[in-house]
Image (spheres, helix red, strand yellow):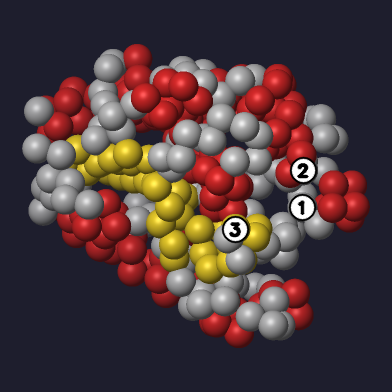
Amino acid sequence: MKKGLVMEGGAMRGMFTCGVIDVLMENNIDFDSAVGVSAGATFGINIVSKQIGRALRYNKKYCNDKRYASLKSLFTTGNIYNVDFCYDTLPYELDLWDMETFYDSKTDFYCVATDINSGEAVYHKCDNRDYNPRGEDINWIRASASMPVVSRPVEIDGGLYLDGGMSDSIPLKFMESQGCDKILVIETQPADYVKKPQKYMSLIKFKLKNYPKMIKTMADRHIMYNSQKKYIADQEKAGNAFVIRPDEPLNIGATEKNPDELQRVYDIGRRVATAKLKDLQQYLA
């Protein structure tokens, strides 16, 4: 039996996911494969490196630090989340990402990015043991979390990539394609959430005017997302997937500056995961 984990993104809604995966780690629940999208990738790597509490810790500590996320960074670098700080200083100096444990893990970890030339999802397996800052894997994780309009496309091997949530928000079908028999999906929206069409298509068309396929992907994202939510609900009902999701909207900002709000959403994740723990353990057995 092969067990898989799928982690949706959603900026600081990802604190919910952090709470869930900490409960999983505390109860020694492991997976053969895991895939993270956007915040599901940046925070989700911690379940493979076995670092309970790390994502909550550094987000609470640095959420008000202008080096982390700020309009100043957006205006001066083109990235609202500062690249140098978030993907170099933070994981390699201030709150170390345990790369040795990550790369020695038996869990295959994938992150999803969107190729802005094709508008299609790309699934990168993080197995390059890039112990140096700005290595290939950390760049793919960065690409997965680079929100359009407020982030510059990430160049990797001649390609250009942005947020994986634009093309495959909740990649259950990808995890199924990896041959997983039992799959846990962590969503960051309630079961009845319905995504509406993108409000800011005029701005997106201006910012991405040279990438018509990416524009179409973003214009159709709500269709893709709502279809995925239905598919996941159907698979859950059929017993083919186990889903942990919030019962109500998390109502947290994308660049939340209040540590108490980060803690609140993290605690919701812990509470929901703990309530479902016995059922999950039976499902995975």
Where's the C terminus, which quadrant? top left
The amino acid type, in three-letter code, at marker 2 is: Asn
Label 3 neighbour load within 10 Å: few <14, some 14-19, many 20+: few
Q: How far apart are marks 3 and 2 (CA)?
A: 18 Å
Q: Kindly indicate the quadrant of the structure image that contains residue 134.
A: top right
**Position above or below: 119 against 161:** below
Q: Distance between the residues labelled 1 and 3?
A: 17 Å
Which mark is first along the chain, 3 or 1? 1
Q: Is residue 13 left or right of residue 256?
A: left
> What residue sits 43% from the left and 27% below the top?
102
Whether the residues at callouts 1 and 2 have beta carbons within 8 Å, the answer is yes
63 vs 115, nearest the viewer: 115
Instruction: Judge depth for marks 3 and 2 and give the one in front.
Output: 3
The amino acid type, in three-letter code, at marker 1 is: Asn
Where does label 2 land, which residue? 82
Kindly give the residue lying farthest to the top in the view shown: 26
Q: In this view, does 151 lie to the left or right of 57?
A: right
Tell me if residue 160 can be seen: yes
Query: Whole-percent x and y of residue 177?
Result: 22, 57
Where does label 3 land, which residue? 156
What SS does tag 2 mark?
loop
Q: Kindly indicate the quadrant of the structure image that contains residue 155.
A: bottom right
The amino acid type, in three-letter code, at marker 3 is: Ile
Query: Whole-percent x and y of residue 214?
Result: 57, 76
Where does label 1 land, which residue? 79
